[in-house]
Amino acid sequence: MQHERDIMHAYVRSLGRRSAGFTLIELMVVVVIATILVGIAVPSYMSQVRKSRRTDAKTALLDLAGREERFMSTNGSQYSTLATDMGYTAYPQVVGSGYYQLQTPVVCNVGPCAGGLPAPSFTLTAVPVAGSMQAGDTTCASFTVDSTGRQTALDSGGANQTATCWAQ
C-alpha cells in the first residue's frame, strides 16, 4: 500500500511539472516577434492600399475628359466648367470610393491659354479628399489630364511623379 501511495505522489508531482505552461520570458519573446512582424506588415499593406485607390482618381479624370469631349462635340467649339453639364451636382465632386475629388475644370475657350494649350482646351485635376486616409499619399498628391491627353501627377512637394503615379 505504501508503494502505491509513493507511485501516486510521484505521478501527481510529474503532472504539476508538465503543466506549468509558458514562462514569462518565452511569452515576451513571442510578443516581441509579433510586434516586429506587425511593424513591417502594416506599413507595407497601407502603401499597397493607397496605390490601389489611385485608380479611382485616374478613372474619374479620364471619364470627365470624355464627358468634356462629348460636350464640345454637341455644343459647338467650347468646353464647360459647369458640373451639371458633365452630369455632376457640383465641384469639387467626390468620386469613386470617396478618397478623391475632382476639382473645377480649368477651361480656356478663347486663346491664349495657360500652359501653352491651344484654344479651346481644358485641364482636369483630382486630389485626395482632405481628412481621408488617401490624403497621406505624399507620392501622388494630385493627378491631371488636359485636352491634349497629357497625363501628369505631382507629389506633395510639387515634383513631377507622372511615371510613378500613372504607370500603376
Image (cartoon, rainbow, N blue to C red):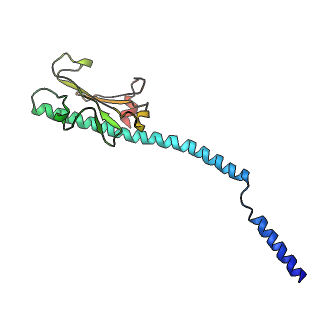
Residue lying at the far top of the rendered structure: 112
Q: Quadrant of the N terminus?
A: bottom right
Please indicate whether residue 37 sits to the left or right of residue 127 in the image. right
Residue lying at the far bottom of the rendered structure: 1
Q: Tell me where residue 70 appears, x and y as whole percent.
A: 15, 35
Q: Measured along the vertical axis of the image, is residue 75 above or below residue 33?
A: above
Q: Tell me where residue 162 appears, x and y as whole percent.
A: 37, 29
Quadrant assignment, res 133: top left
**Marker count (numbered):** 0
Q: Measured along the vertical axis of the image, is residue 109 above or below residue 31?
A: above
Give me the residue at 38% from left, 40% from top.
53
Q: Measured along the vertical axis of the image, is residue 72 above or below residue 45?
A: above
Please indicate whether residue 65 sits to the left or right of residue 4 in the image. left
Quadrant assignment, res 81: top left
Quadrant assignment, res 54: top left
The residue lying toward the viewer, choosing from 9 and 64, is 9
Give me the residue at 75% from left, 62% from top.
20
Q: Measured along the vertical axis of the image, is residue 123 above or below residue 59?
A: above
Give me the residue at 84% from left, 72% from top.
10
Q: Tell me where residue 30 appears, x and y as whole percent.
A: 66, 51
Q: Tell me where residue 62 appears, x and y as whole percent.
A: 26, 36
Q: Quadrant of the C terminus?
A: top left
